[in-house]
Structure formats: C-alpha cells, structure tokens
Image (tube, rainbow, N blue to C red):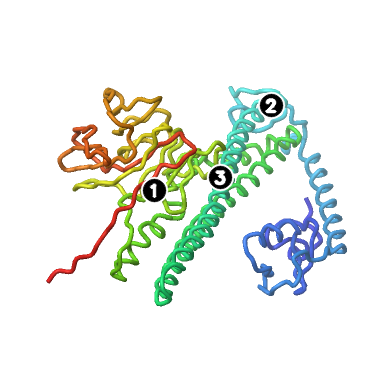
Amino acid sequence: MSAPFFQVGDYFCSICHNIFKNPVVLVCSHNFCKDCLKQRWSRSLLKLCPLCKRRSPKSDPPDNLALKNLCESVTLNISQEEKTYARSEALCSLHSEKLKLFCLDHQQPVCVVCRDSRAHTNHRFSPVDEAAEDCRKELREQLGALQNQMRHCKRVKLNWDQTTEHIKTQTQTTESQIREKFKKLQYFLTKEEEARISALRREEEQKIKMMRLKILTLSRQIESLSDTIKATEEELKSESVTFLQRYQAAVEKTKQRPLMEAPKLGKGALLDVSKHLGNLTFNIWNKMKEMVNYSPVILDPNTAGSTLFVFEDLRHLLCVERQSLLPQNPERVEKHPMVLGSQGFNSGTHSWDVEVRSDADWAVGVIGESEPRKGSNLSGYWELHYRDGVYKAYSPPVMEECLSVQEQLQRIRVKLDWTKGTLSFTDLDTNTLIYTFFSAFTERVFPFVNTLHTKPLSILPQKVTVQVGT
C-alpha cells in the first residue's frame, strides 16, 4: 500500500490520534474532533485548548468545514487503497495461487501447492472459510467477555455517579444543619462555626476527589475497552483471508485486555456526617462550660435501610412508605429497617435511653461489627423487640424468649457491659429490669434501632453537668 500524500499532523486529531471527525476550530486556530473536545471539556469547568491551554470564549466552537471535507477525502482514499491491497494479497506470495487452505499447524493461509510442499509435510489443513469461522467463533467469545465487562463497568460507574451526587447533597444538607445550630449560639462562636465548615469542605473535596479519580480511572478503562471492541468488530467484518492474516494480532490484542476484578466501592466513600454533626452542641458546650443536651448514641444515616428516614438531629427515625434512592455503600443495611449508631463499643460500660411506642413494631439492641449488612438473615445481634403486641428477647439463631411486661414500655434504658459480657434492658418509668443477655462479646458491637412505624422512635438526650475539681 502506497504511503499517503498528506502530512500526518494536518489531518489527525491530537486527542484521539485519528483522522478528524466533524472537526471544530478554537480561537487559537487549533482543531479537534467535536466529540473528543466535548468529552475532554466535560471533565473540567474551564474550557481550555488541550494544546496551548488558551481559554475558549465559546462552549460550542464552530465547525471547520474545509478541514472536514479534506479529511473525508483522505479517508476515502485510504479505504480504497486498503481494499486494493487486500485483493492483491489474496494470492500466495510463493506460487501466485489462490489461498484456499489454512494450515492448522502453521496457523496461516496456504495454496494447494504449499500443501504438497516439504514445508507442510504431515500438516493438517482446513478450508479457508471453515478455518475463518472457527477463528471468528473464538474471537467472538473474547469479544463477548469484553462487552460484558464493559456493561458491568458502566453499571458501576452509574452507581458511583449517583454516590458523588449524594455526597454533594449530604454536603449541602449538613452545611445547612451546621449553620442552623450555630445561629443559636452567641456571636463569639463564629470562628468555631467557620472551622467546622472548613473541615466539612475539606472532607467534601477529599471524598469527591476520590470518587472523581475512581470514575476517571473507570472511564478510561471503558474507553480502552470500547476501542478494543470496535477494533475487534472491524476485524470480524473483514474478508476471510484478510481476517486470517490479521487474526493472531487481533487475538493478542484482546488477550492484552484481561478481565479485571469487578470494581467495588470501598468503605468510607460517603461523607462522614456523624463526624460533623454528632454531639455538635456537646462539643461546643464543653468549650463554653454551659449546660447542654448530650446523646450517648448518634445514629449514622449512612447505615440506614432504604425504608428509614433519619432526622437531622441524628436521634430520631421513622419508617417511610416510599423507599429512598440511596447509594449502595458497604455500611448500609440492605434488607432490614435498621439504623446503627455511629460509634461501636469493644470495652467498658455504656448506656443509652430509647423512647419507644406501644402502637408500633420496634427493636433495640446491639449488633456485631462483622455481621454482613447485605443479607436477608442476620444472626450476630441481641435485641429486645415489640411485635404484634408481644415483647421478646431475641438473639438468633437459637435464642427467643417471650417476656412478661406489666405496663406498656415507653422508655427503655439499654446498658452494655462489654467487658463482663452483659446487655440489659430496663423500664425507665418503673425502674424495673426487663431482661439481661449474657454473652462473651468477641468483637466491637454497635447500637441499633429498628422500626416499621411511620411515627418516630428517639434516642433520648442526657443532661450533662461540669464539675471542676478543687
């Protein structure tokens, strides 16, 4: 095939390195494929020339029709030369006979004279069309695997895009809540407010940067897979002889794209709302030495099941009739109307009070850190629950005991002594012990609340005072 008559730099896009398709021209006179430039600009707020970095005043630069016509002419010439080249190569280079056979031992097309030559003694042969079909079948299998991987990557990318948007929403909501709390404080706490907003912004920047890096890496993988798939599809469309001549290179190219492990969203991808909002007034009170309300358990909305709504104070929750569209982050409980506390315990004694209802099904207790949160059947937890008018102590899979309660429970104190291995439930209104679990805890456990009712359950605040030693 004769060399092209044009200069490479005149007709090739510097982004995709292919002949221009629908070229556009920037004010700096540099040309790019319209789709290539659009994709490059989608990753940045500034519309900069990819070559000289000069800012473009237009987000939709004009088409370069003259260059487009030249490129289409060049593409047509190249296509014609390739077809001529393919026809000329359909004959055996040694005997000028048609290549009708395929040597299975040498993996190459041959003519009938080659078959009878010494070079192919005792070799196995197949008609060209049959061999091409067998090779196409193998290549199609490789192509199918790549296509499946790309579809999965796109699904993961969609979820990660939603996660990024959820982080932004979390940031906006959390900022609003922080500002509302700070309005209740005196003016001299402005610096404290700004410090916390800055921390929130830094985490937002870190988390979004992390997600963008993941998405960028995944996008590049998808783009690379797409290029390989397109090239392979083009090979499959070629004539049998041409296909067989390029077959080995095509197979090697697909094998260079091994199936990677399914992308996963790691823990801690979402904004740590509990860090910014948890015990916020308590921490400020500790500096101001004033009376505050303190909650020993802060609910973590990143763990809440899709049917739960956690209030902005992170102490109240209720069941909603319509499921929420939430990111499927690893921390979230998937199959149960449950939300966990933001802090787990693996030592010492801890207690917290929960306001429950007599007209709603609910459960309170603790759950092991290693318990899978995506399955239907949970087992590593200990709870007191109220269901269909009956109180039970429950710890699956073997322990379930009906409880005799004189009065309907309204407020329950949960007390965990991790070291001694006890978990007790007390009726606060009558100061009566309801039930005590005895278990040798071997890992960190997290408080949880479970409800199926549209009326809220609450973690009750505690009154805290400061005593200065003399």
Residue 159: numbered disc: 3
The three-letter amino acid code for the residue at tag 1 is Leu
Mark 1, Cα crowd under 10 Å, few <14 / some 14-19 / many 20+, is many
Q: Which residue is found at the position 65% from the left and 47% from the top?
A: 227
Q: Mark 1 or 2, which is nearer the eye? A: 1
Task: Answer above or below: position of 157 versus 198.
Answer: above
Task: Determine whether label 3 and label 2 are within 8 Å by CB.
Answer: no
Q: Mark 3 or 2, which is nearer the eye? A: 3
Disc 1 target residue? 299
Q: Nearer the viewer, residue 140 or 290?
A: 290
Q: Based on the displayed image, in which of its 4 quarters is residue 456 positioned? A: top left
Question: Which secondary structure lies at badge 1?
Answer: loop
Disc 2 target residue? 133
Task: Determine whether label 1 and label 3 are within 8 Å by CB.
Answer: no
Q: Which residue is found at the position 45% from the left and 69% from the top?
A: 198
The three-letter amino acid code for the residue at tag 2 is Glu
Q: Based on the displayed image, in which of its 4 quarters is residue 154 positioned? A: top right
Q: Nearer the viewer, residue 43 or 201?
A: 201
Question: Which secondary structure lies at badge 2?
Answer: helix
Quadrant occupied by the C terminus: bottom left
User: Is residue 83 toward the left or the right of residue 295 in the image?
Assistant: right
- Mark 3–mark 2 Cα distance, whole angstroms, equals 39 Å
